[in-house]
Amino acid sequence: VQLQASGGGLVQAGGSLSLSCTASGSIFRVNAIGWYRQAPGKQRELVASWQYGGNTIYADSVKGRFTISKDNAKNLVYLQMNSLQPEDTAVYYCNANLYERLRSPVGDYWGQGTLVTVSS
């Protein structure tokens, strides 16, 4: 299983960016797929996650500004980030928790990080 992330970049405060992540390979079922971020000197934290069944989870700090959505025909998830602030600056990592096959153990997978920089 591979996670391919794209998007990110540099934006001014108040601006918008979008991220996307595609999971490929042997995938039976995705339990959750979403984004974490890690700012310099800080621990990695959950930003937003799509859960099996369609529920979504957001960090309090991004509620109302970020939206996660999933293409149900593909293992593709988008993160639309609006009203970005300097404190959103971090490396964003795609994460998926999934089963590769019907009776395989659940696995946790990470994509390469993508840098989001918000200037003030």
Image (cartoon, grey):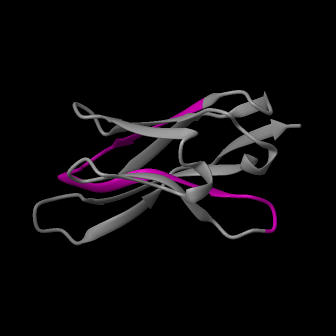
Q: Which of 120 and 44 is in front in this view?
A: 120
Question: Which span is picked out in magenta?
Answer: 18-41
Labels in figure, total: 0
Q: Relative to 95, is 92 on the left or the right?
A: right
Q: Main secondary structure of the magenta part?
A: strand
Query: Is residue 35 a member of the stretch shown in magenta?
Result: yes
Q: Nearer the viewer, residue 58 or 108?
A: 58
Q: Relative to 107, is 45 on the left or the right?
A: right
Pick out the residue farthest to the front: 64
Q: Quadrant of the C terminus?
A: top right
Pick out the residue farthest to the left: 102
Residue 86 quadrant:
top right
Residue at 29% across, 51% down: 55
Could you say where residue 34 lies in the image, as x and y percent from the top left? 44, 50
Could you say where residue 106 lies in the image, as x and y percent from the top left? 26, 69
Query: Is residue 16 a member of the stretch shown in magenta?
Result: no
